[in-house]
């Protein structure tokens, strides 16, 4: 017991100052599989480093904050920096759409948000891809990174920072970081021979490979490589990583991925090479420009250099003070090991705080295989956006794929879901209600929505559902958040059908007054949907909000508080009813003579459809 307490105190000291010699690290000798060589690179003195101590930011949770993401600072979220070996595909878009929805939700909560994305531009694959195009690496990177930026614009991705790893400020920060790790005694030189997957840019263990030494992700044989490289002493951090994950189980999400990470660590961490002799297209190793820094060691630091405000005079300290540590690294599960094992160890070595959470989502698959650039089995997001618009693409993937799990794409399912949810449940409800309001109330609300809904159970339902959506957004359950919001739409349609205001209007007198209030109630629910769904479908939600008589400024400055019942006021004039989301077959008929529409009819029984009301 006493020994345990002593251990905790020692841990606490280390947590406050990670540069302090950790009690565990002295016991853990790096597992050396390498022939060490004398190390000639000069280093920064460790005494100068100790003045740069950083707090090790632990990921604590409270009841109000059950996922440990919130601590009062800015909410910093990152996507992977995508590798520019090929243009973006739907997989890259998927992570970015999810990150954008989370960032938009956090902004709605009134948080200062820094949303970082960008491109990873060094390494062997890039040089090869450029050569294959008859281009040079630099030109190639310009073209491909621009393709990412264009797609993000078309998908309405509102990022704050776009970092390219060929940016000079990034290079300066990588070199400084490398020097810190070196000064901490965690870099050494050795020979290594092993099986290498060029597509993963990673040495592999034979036991993780398929027949013929094929990489299980890229289905291509790994090649035997022998190099004289600099290594990072990852093994030294094994116990520390184990302790970190035990103390901060929220660090890796979803929770089932934590087990995966813990078992990798338990099976033994091997030092990894962080330089390449055979690759010219990279950042030179400080004091040894015959070698370049390994692309992963370089790319992960993009999350830090993205924060650097000054393009010319950037250094690690100033970048760190602009928002580090990251609240959430959003990544695909393919790069979990880099983010949940290598990266924290690198940060510990450099004396920097750890990110609060790494969330590894699942894959969009095609025939059960991860859709990816290297396999070439990708779905073209530009085509989808052109055909269906950004709202449909964003909604479908966030609603359809349970965040964290894999999901397969099917065009039939896409069309059915989007039509049923966005065109019918939400769009049609708005259109019918505004149509009735125009016909019977000169498009003007007869009462405040609070007065109209006095004692109304439908209002309670809406309030419960929107709160449910908030909790799901907070917990990164994006699909469930969409589901709860769509439930408001379904409840609105049921309310409309039960109340049948069109027939109440025909009766006149009190019945007609009650019908006018019913319309206010339904429109208030749609107003709430427009705010709550705006992280997922920003344009559609603005169109709804605009039709309810609000300005774009009012929409842009709205916060989650506006999901409270009571925004619509008596006397407010609604816009002329106009469909906010055209059903897909209508648009497809123009383009393909109705083939898609036929497909939808064939599949219509697969997704529940909301009944239209002829009278509206
Ligand atoms: N099929 C996919 N499903 C979900 N996310 C994906 C998918 N493919 C890529 N991503 C996202 O992109 C990240 C990987 O980026 P990268 O630029 O290496 O793309 P890639 O297509 O996976 O490349 P490659 O096929 O060469 O391995 C993943 O971690 C994930 O965030
Ligand atoms: Zn691979």
Image: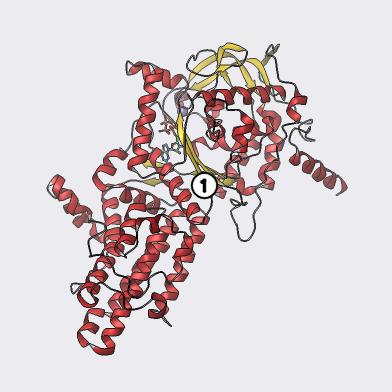
x, y percent for residue 118: 45, 33
Image quadrant holding the C terminus, namely: bottom left
Q: Is residue 115 left or right of residue 356?
A: left
- Between 433 and 399, the one lying in front of the other is 433
Q: Is residue 615 left or right of residue 18?
A: left
| Relative vertical location of residue 400 with respect to residue 343 in this rendering, above or below | below
| Relative vertical location of residue 534 with respect to residue 164 in this rendering, above or below | below
**Residue for point 60% across, 12% down:** 288
Q: Residue furthest left?
A: 593
Residue 151's image quarter? top left
Residue 512's image quarter? bottom left
**Mark 1 vs ligand 1: CB under 8 Å?**
no
- Between 32 and 453, the one lying in front of the other is 453
- State the SS at label 1: strand
x, y percent for residue 334: 49, 36
x, y percent for residue 425: 30, 64
Q: Mark 1 sits on what residue?
A: 113
Q: Residue furthest right?
A: 2
| Relative vertical location of residue 313 with respect to residue 256 in this rendering, above or below | above
- Colour scheme: secondary structure
x, y percent for residue 108: 47, 56
Q: Is residue 88 visible?
A: no
């Amino acid at each position: 017991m006493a020994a345990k307490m002593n251990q905790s105190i020692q841990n606490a000291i280390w947590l406050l100052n990670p540069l302090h010699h950790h009690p565990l690290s002295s016991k853990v000798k790096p597992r050396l599989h390498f022939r060490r060589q004398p190390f000639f690179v000069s280093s920064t003195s460790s005494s100068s480093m100790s003045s740069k101590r950083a707090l090790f930011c632990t990921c604590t949770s409270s009841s109000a904050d059950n996922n440990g993401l919130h601590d009062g600072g800015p909410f910093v979220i990152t996507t992977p920096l995508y590798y520019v070996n090929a243009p973006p595909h739907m997989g890259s878009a998927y992570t970015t759409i999810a990150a954008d929805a989370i960032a938009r939700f956090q902004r709605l909560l009134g948080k200062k948000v820094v949303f970082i994305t960008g491109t990873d531009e060094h390494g062997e694959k890039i040089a090869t891809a450029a050569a294959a195009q008859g281009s040079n690496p630099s030109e190639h990177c310009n073209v491909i990174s621009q393709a990412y930026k264009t797609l993000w614009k078309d998908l309405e991705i509102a990022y704050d920072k776009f970092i390219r790893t060929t940016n000079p400020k990034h290079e300066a920060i990588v070199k400084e970081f490398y020097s810190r790790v070196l000064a901490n005694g965690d870099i050494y030189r050795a020979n290594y021979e092993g099986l290498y997957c060029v597509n993963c840019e990673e040495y592999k263990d034979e036991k993780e490979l398929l027949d013929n030494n094929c990489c299980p992700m890229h289905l291509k044989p790994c090649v035997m490589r022998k190099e004289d490289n600099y290594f990072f002493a990852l093994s030294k951090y094994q116990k520390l990583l184990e302790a970190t994950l035990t103390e901060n189980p929220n660090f890796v999400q979803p929770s089932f991925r934590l087990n995966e990470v813990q078992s990798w660590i338990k099976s033994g961490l091997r030092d990894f090479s962080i330089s390449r002799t055979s690759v010219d297209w990279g950042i030179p190793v400080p004091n040894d420009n015959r070698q370049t820094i390994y692309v992963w060691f370089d790319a992960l630091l993009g999350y830090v250099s993205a924060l650097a405000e000054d393009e010319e005079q950037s250094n690690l300290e100033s970048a760190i003070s602009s928002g580090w540590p990251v609240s959430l690294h959003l990544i695909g599960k393919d790069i979990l090991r880099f983010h949940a094992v290598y990266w924290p160890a690198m940060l510990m070595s450099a004396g920097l705080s750890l990110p609060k959470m790494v969330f590894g989502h699942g894959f969009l698959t095609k025939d059960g295989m991860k859709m990816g650039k290297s396999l070439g089995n990708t779905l073209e997001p530009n085509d989808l956006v052109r055909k269906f618009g950004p709202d449909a693409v964003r909604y479908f993937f966030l609603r359809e794929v349970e965040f964290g799990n894999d999901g397969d794409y099917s065009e039939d399912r896409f069309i059915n879901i989007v039509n049923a949810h966005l065109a019918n449940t939400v769009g049609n409800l708005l259109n019918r209600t505004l149509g009735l309001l125009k016909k019977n109330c000169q498009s003007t609300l007869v009462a405040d929505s609070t007065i109209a809904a006095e004692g109304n159970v439908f209002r309670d339902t809406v309030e419960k559902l929107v709160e449910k959506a908030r909790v799901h957004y907070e917990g990164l359950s994006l699909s469930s958040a969409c589901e709860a919001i769509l439930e408001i739409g379904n409840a609105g349609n049921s309310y409309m059908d039960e109340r049948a205001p069109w027939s109440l209007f025909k009766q006149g007198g009190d019945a007609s007054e009650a019908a006018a209030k019913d319309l206010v109630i339904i429109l208030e629910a749609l107003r709430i949907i427009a705010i709550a769904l705006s992280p997922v479908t920003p344009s559609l939600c603005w169109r709804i909000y605009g039709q309810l008589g609000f300005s774009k400024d009012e929409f842009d400055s709205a916060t989650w508080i506006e999901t409270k019942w009571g925004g619509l006021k008596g006397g407010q004039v609604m816009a002329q009813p106009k469909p906010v989301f055209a059903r897909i077959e209508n648009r497809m008929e123009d383009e393909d003579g109705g083939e898609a529409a036929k497909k939808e009819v064939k599949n219509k029984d697969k997704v529940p459809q909301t009944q239209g009301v002829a009278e509206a």
